[in-house]
Amino acid sequence: MATRTSFPLILCLWGAGLGAAGQYAKISVIFDQLGAVYPDAGTALGFIVSLVGFVGILLGVVAGLVVARIRYRRAMLWALWAGAGVSLFQALLPSLPLMLASRVIEGVSHLAIVIAAPTLIAQFSEDRHRGLTLTLWSTFFGVAFTLLVALGLPLVEARGLPALFIAHSIWMATFALVLTLFLRPLETAQEGHLSLRGILGDHLTIYRSPSIAAPGAGWLFYTFCFLAILTVLPPYIAPEWRAWVMGAMPLVSIAVSMTLGVFALRFISAVMLVQIGFAGSVAALIWLLAAPGLPAACLLLAAALGLVQGATFAAIPQLNDTAATQSQAYGALAQTGNLGNTIGTPALLVILSIAGYSGLIWTSIIVLAGGFAVHAWMAKRRGH
């Protein structure tokens, strides 16, 4: 672990993370315009968005193991250059099969960054700064989506779809160059060779460990609900408040995690703060059950989930001492997070169609209470 925090380096790693989040966000924000580019795609068009997530589900843990073996700096730089090249290729608006193939490559690049970057941030941060730096890292998705809506969409309107892909390529290449110059290799013990048997064994080791698996286990419950709630809640908010509340919720999550969350981490463990966040989100949902669509309850829910977001990333180095176990934990986090994001929205939409608003809220309460419970169970196992 570092004896001095290099904040410029931390910010560069976070900037690379914004590029990784942009691999998701650049497609999401222009998805309604892709039908004109691929008019015969039909339902296959959805795979342009989802393929990156499916790669995360399938290869999240494997990527954590690979990144540890090939070294974090090397993985980071390879992933950034690959991401820059893929975006440049996508600017040509290739045929749908080639676009889908590029998204698979992009999914691998994305995984390498979201595993290597937080591992490096944890290793290059002093103990007293690690809560701050990893909470900053946790904001990369929300900030990237906000930037792409605020800056990317006007760019597309002015210059067309290829301009967005070119801009993303330049962003990735810029951070690849900067990190090539300033990111030093991380000294870690040499890992063994990869094999199918070893990978299966490592999956078992990771998910049996109450230290390595705990952040990812809780993250599954968080990701199941967060994006899904943002998707299905708007019709229940009064029209005059709807746009303001939905725009404010992600920003409130980020603001609370960076202020109250960072402050609280000075006094309590990250796992305890995650549990407080889950408990607060359940309280907010009970309020929403009594007062459907109430703006104040929606913002309280976002604030509570913001605590879960930041503290989950801070929990990984608190529970895992070595870079290798941290990268395994980040791999598990990527796997469970992609799984939660993939199944959460369809599941809640089905429940909403069957059981209505109250069924939606009660399901969300049960899921988020499950996040609290799984952390309590893991903590009990660590105690034994």
Image (spheres, rainbow, N blue to C red):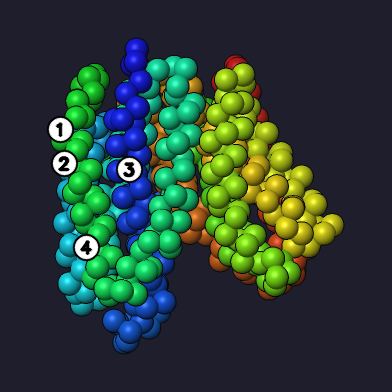
Residue 372 vertical position relative to residue 265 in the rendered view, above or below: below
Residue in the foreground of this view, choosing between 85 and 150: 150
Q: Amino acid at mark 4?
A: Ile
Q: Earlier in the sequence, mark 1 or mark 4?
A: 4
Query: Mark 2 near mark 1, Cβ–Cβ under 8 Å?
Result: yes
Label 4 crowd (10 A; few <14 / some 14-19 / many >=20)? many
Helix, strand or loop for disc 2: helix
Residue in the foreground of this view, choosing between 283 and 131: 131
Residue that label 3 marks = 15
Residue displayed at 22% across by 19% down: 187
Q: Is 178 displayed left or right of 158 in the figure?
A: left
Helix, strand or loop for disc 3: helix
Q: Is 113 displayed left or right of 294 in the figure?
A: left
Instruction: Locate residue 309, reporting x and y percent.
Output: 54, 40
Instruction: Locate residue 136, reporting x and y percent.
Output: 45, 36
Rendering quarter of residue 11: top left
Q: Amino acid at mark 2?
A: Leu
Q: Earlier in the sequence, mark 1 or mark 3?
A: 3
As measured in the structure, the alpha-carbon distance from the residue carrying label 1 to the one carrying label 3 is: 15 Å
As measured in the structure, the alpha-carbon distance from the residue carrying label 4 to the one carrying label 2 is: 16 Å
Residue that label 4 marks = 166
Counting the numbered discs, the total is: 4
Residue that label 2 marks = 177
Residue that label 1 marks = 181
As measured in the structure, the alpha-carbon distance from the residue carrying label 3 to the one carrying label 4 is: 17 Å
Q: Amino acid at mark 1?
A: Leu
